[in-house]
Image (spheres, rainbow, N blue to C red):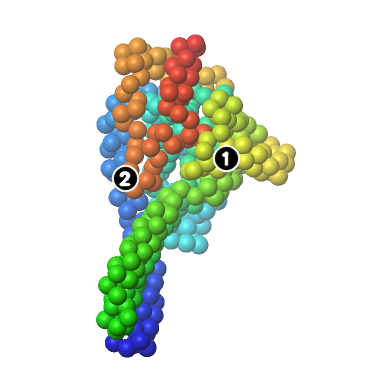
Amino acid sequence: MNGVDMKKYLVCLIVGSGILLASGCTAQAKKEVRSIVDQERSRILSAQSKYEDPLANKYLGIIAESILSAARSLDLDENHQVSDKETLDIYDQFTVYIVHDPTPNAWVVGDDFACISTAAILHAEHPEELAFILGHEFGHLRGEHQVESYERKYANKFAAGLAVGLGSLSAGYQSSNNPNYSQAQYQRDMANVLAAGQSIIASFEPHRKSDEYKSDQIALELMVEAGFPIERSPDWLERMLLIYGEGDGKTHPKTEKRVKRIRELVHEYGELNPTRTFNLEQFREIQDRIRSETLALADDENLAFYFAERPTLSSGVLPPIKSCGPSDAELDQIFDYYSKMILDN
């Protein structure tokens, strides 16, 4: 193969590979997102850390159903279809599971359910804060952020493989056709090719900070459509900032920036006339029930089991406990505060 043929071959390889990637990446990403739903749901339902209380589950379920109804109203056409794009089936249900966890956090799984920790609920002071949290999680579904994460993962692996493949072909071509190309040079070039592939793999980021900002915006849109008041939407995040301080910003934007942006968006909506309000006494009753059971479990288990069943995926789509939540606070700090909080109330 001469130099001209080699160039043509490489161009065809790159173009053909790009077409294959574009055609199959999104479909495979959606398939993989769907595949984790049943697996993670079964794990949550059987986990020791799942919080079982019909009243609390119903309370969160009503908020979740309101969020889902608002999304349907905004996104579905008269035939109850999403007309503008192919999407995951996120509009059939939105289930929320409460799990015992000392990390104030919520996360979404697959295409139809989310989890919220008992600590997140106990850290809230008003039910509107929970509506914003659940709206934010549904925003990740609406924005297909998990699908896009898998797409980036596949594209990242493809780019790494293509770089290594092209580099290997180039080095092999030089070795076969260039008499001045030494074995030592070939080995150095191959080492650089492999290092480049590894560097590309290491550059993969499952979470994008822009997704968090977008989900915050979607949460407000859904709350307004549902008729909920939005003035307290940033309060929970601001409270996390006061309690735990800023995180390292690796997986989420700086909390202070998020709070500022949410307040700006709330201001842009201007004066609204909410058609639905929350009963604060009911909310506090839910908190009291969660706090009482958490205290009983703390006496029996010393809170140790909370750390054993935190959702983690090898793909990195869900964060490990030490780097989740808005603040990325250290475990000991969370543990101490959480223990003190339930014991002092």
The residue under label 1 is: 254
Residue type, label 2:
Ser
Residue at mark 2: 314
Relative height, residue 104 to residue 113 (above, below): above
Q: Which residue is pictured at 58% across the width and 37% down the height?
A: 255
| Image mark count | 2
13 or 231: nearer the eye?
13
Percent position (x, y) of residue 144? 45, 53
Q: Quadrant of residue 197?
A: bottom left
Instruction: Identify which residue is drawn at 52% across, 41% down.
Output: 249
Q: Amino acid at mark 1?
A: Lys
Mark 2 element type: loop
Q: CA gap, disc 2 to disc 1?
A: 25 Å
Q: Is residue 1 visible?
A: yes
Within-10-Å neighbours for mark 2: few <14, some 14–19, many 20+? few
Mark 1: which secondary structure? loop
Q: Quadrant of the N terminus?
A: bottom left
Q: Nearer the viewer, residue 249 or 278?
A: 249
Task: Tell me which numbered mark, 2 or 1, is placed earlier along the sequence.
Answer: 1
- In the picture, measured across the screen, residue 275 lies left or right of residue 151, that is right
Locate residue 61, reporting x and y percent.
44, 33
- Residue 149 appears in the rendering: no
- Image location (x, y in percent) of residue 5: 34, 87
The residue nearer to you, when weighing 71 against 78, is 71
